Amino acid sequence: MDDVPLIRRAQEGDERAARLLFDMYQLRTYRLALGLLGDTADAEEVAQDALTYALLNIYRYKEHLSSFSTWLHTITVSRARDKRRRKVLPSISMAQWLGMGNQIRDYEPGPEAHIMRREVEGGLLSALNKLSPKLREAIVLRFYADCTYKEMGEIMDCSLNTARSRLRLAIEKLRVQLGEEQVRWLASETIR
């Protein structure tokens, strides 16, 4: 769906358009925050905060500088970094938390929920928890948020080559933790 008309209407003060944008980006923003933080409560808080900020300040969005999703991802990553700085994240890993019978809350059951469950079962989220924040951001932005290297560089405030290097290093670290077979699809994706 083309979000440009909705963005323009929201910039003109149309609250209904802003609500539609919120609904459109809610799950994506939550998944990005969850991938970055590994904690559902923190992810919900960060996603809510990022979306609220973006929509209250939508007049600051400049279409000629980036896509709306890149702008929103930048805000979300920034909020997630702030959250990590303000709070010592729980010492329990995501895999342990899920093993106690907890579940990742789905805003909308669908293919994303199935993929998330499969990733958790495969140990990917547990392995992501062990990566440094910068490497985790690279993986999450590329494979959860489907960002290009250029967008990753803009969001992480680094060069395109640095974004590529971080992604390659993150994949190598995941390969050590998970094995070749489980990360083969990630390596093939980096060639694109």
Image (cartoon, rainbow, N blue to C red):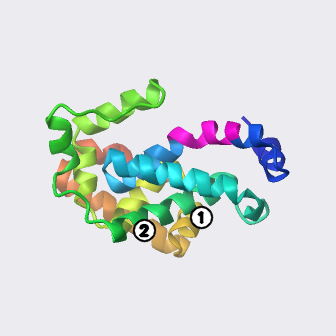
Q: Closer to the N terminus: mark 1 or mark 2?
A: 2
Indicate the position of residue 50 as horizontal and vertical percent values: 55, 55
Residue name at image x 18 percent, y 51 percent: 93
Disc 1 crowd, CA 10 A, few/some/many (<14, 14-19, 20+): some
Camera-side residue of 59 and 109: 59
Label 1 residue SS: helix
| Dot 1 amino acid type | Lys
| Label 2 crowd bin: few (<14), some (14–19), many (20+), radius 10 Å | few
Q: Amino acid at mark 2?
A: Asp
Image quarter in which the N terminus is found: top right
**Main secondary structure of the magenta stretch:** helix
Does residue 184 appear in the picture of this structure? yes
Q: Residue at x 46, y 45 (%)?
A: 30
Q: Is residue 69 left or right of residue 183?
A: right
Q: Is residue 23 magenta?
A: yes
Tell me the tag on residue 82.
2
Span highlighted in magenta in the image: 19-27
Q: Which residue is mark 1?
A: 150
Residue 174 is situated, as x and y percent measured from the top left of the image, at 25, 55
157 to 177, vertically: above or below: below
